[in-house]
Image (tube, grey):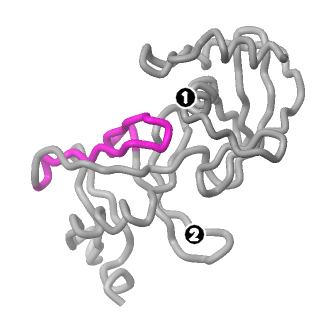
Amino acid sequence: MTDLMRYAAELDGAGQKGLPPVDKWHPEFCGEIDLVIKRDGTWVHEGTPIGRARLVRLFSTVLRREGDDYFLVTPVEKMEIAVEDVPFLAVLMRREGEGEAQKLVFTSNVGDEAVAGPDHPLVFRADPETGERAPYIDMRSRLEARIARAVYYDLVALGETRDIDGEEMFGVFSDGVFFPFGPASEVYE
């Protein structure tokens, strides 16, 4: 059993206690581990999906992004993993408040919550496979979640058109920020 696995076993349930300070840990790089976070949110170790949600949650708490690379980090070990798109999926959304004062709270597949706003922006990027624009939210420390299709439909239902610098844009407000999905003429086509 690697030090990472031992550390994970010791921290079982850490998600309820808060996140470890992975940004303060600077261990030596130990190499790669055969762990892939698939585009659909499945965590796969050595070709086998990890079936225990608590273990996935635990590993997610020691995940760190550096540039375009992802690492599982403990005080003594840093191991690179593969991520096909982004590490998380936003699987739930709830609305608190209304209008420009509303806050949209997203919950990831590992239980993290983030309010879309200045600290957790919503962005749209073209999907490399389909070319379609897909929505993402920064969940924590540059670790993003792709917004699941059903949640995206709920988000669109809250959308409105606003004039931004002379162009009609379709988007949503959350925590005082208007997040445009794109030009209204393109969204409504």
The earlier-in-sequence mark between 1 and 2 is 1
Q: Residue at 63% of width from left, 40% of height from top?
A: 51
Residue 54, labelled with which disc?
A: 1
**Residue 57 falls left or right of residue 135:** right
Residue farthest left in this picture = 98
Residue kind at label 1, given as amino acid type: Arg
In the image, 18 versus 188, the foreground residue is: 18
Residue farthest bottom in this picture = 189
Residue 126, labelled with which disc?
A: 2
Count of numbered circles on the image: 2
The image position of residue 93, as x and y in percent, is 31, 50
**Residue 119 falls left or right of residue 65:** left
In magenta segment, residue 105: yes
Above/below status of 103 relative to 146: above
Quadrant of the image occupied by residue 66: top right
Q: Residue at 85% of width from left, 21% of height from top?
A: 29
> Which segment is the magenta one?
99-120
The image position of residue 99, as x and y in percent, is 11, 55
In the image, 6 versus 72, the foreground residue is: 6
